[in-house]
Image: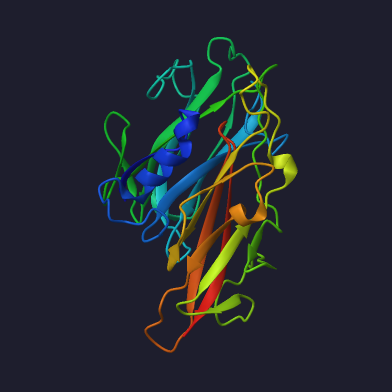
Amino acid sequence: MNARASLSRPPSKVWLVAVLCAAGCDDSLKSVSLIEETRVLGARIEVEADPHRSSPNPGEHASLRFFLAAPDGQPRISYALSVCAVRLVNSGFPACEGAPFASALEPDEGHADARLDFQVPEDLDREVTPHVFARGLICANSGLNLGPDGSPSCVTGSGTEVAFEFGLAGPDQSNQSPTFAADTFSLDGEPWAATADATCDSGSLRQVMAKTRHALRVDLADSDFETLTQPTSVDPGRETLLVSPFSNAGELSNGFLSLGADTPPVQRAVSWDAPAINDALPRLVRFYFVVRDARAGEDFAERALCVLP
């Protein structure tokens, strides 16, 4: 992995920067939606008292989890993460106001998740530092070392630098993350449920034929599209959500869906072309989905199916 993944900040460019860089900023020929190596696809903040809220209050416990995808569905990573309080800036990444107030270090390869549990300091002044900034390094299939100055580096490869900024809760700021429910996804008009036993031998996965086209539809709950404050009459009254689909095989027609509460069903779907099969054995294909609002609210889901010769 030789990319820098900026997963928030500024909000209007969250999806574009995160997904294009995660695909490999040095390889313009790669498909944005094809998972060919371990990649960082997004991140989610969960407040302990309300897991759907992405904006903690000072004094509250919360967690930050990065979404990882691998072609075989089994990421093996090491990582170093930290969070600090920051002022608002108009461009670029903000500088920490003081030392990080929480950090996580997992130097040995083999973790499937990159996660940091933290408590926002009770005495943090929301007027001065209304945001929290997380940054770090995630190494795929490699351990991690710390240099003399404490800076992390991967034992093998350059890894993925991650940066994620989110707001603190306050009188005029509180955000609920959109959430993928169990019935969010459908395949060719039929419910597409998650399964714990994602193998073609189990018989529990949907089956499709090689070199056929299929429709993947995403139906989010109406409550996911939060009401927004409208400074002017031309500002939107409710959130627009961006859904990014990925797969480890085949070809998706679109790299993202822009969804509103009133988006018609036909515009909530992407087509996927199943790959050719070179032998007589079924092929397991994994799908990954990320949904984002523009206020650091995100969620992640996985699905799978079997392609038959």
Residue at x 26%, y 31% (from the top left corner): 148
Q: Position of residue 116 (x, y in %)?
A: 53, 38
How many dots with numbers?
0
- Would you say 49 lies left or right of 16 here? right
Using residue 242 as the reference point, say whether residue 79 is left or right of it. Answer: left
| Image spot of residue 45 (x, y percent) | 59, 37
Q: Nearer the viewer, residue 301 or 83?
A: 301
Q: Find residue 269 and report its horizontal and vertical position in percent.
A: 58, 57
Nearer the observer, 178 or 234: 234
Q: Is residue 273 above or below residue 144?
A: below
Say if residue 227 shows up in the picture.
Answer: yes
- Horizontally, residue 282 falls left or right of residue 118, namely left
Q: Is residue 106 visible in this depiction of the protein? A: no
Specify the color scheme: rainbow
The picture quadrant where one finds residue 31 is: bottom left
Which quadrant of the structure image shows residue 231?
top right
Residue furthest to the bottom:
280
Residue at x-position 31% and y-position 56% = 30
Could you say which is closer to the camera, residue 220 or residue 85?
A: 220
Q: Is residue 106 above or below residue 13?
A: below
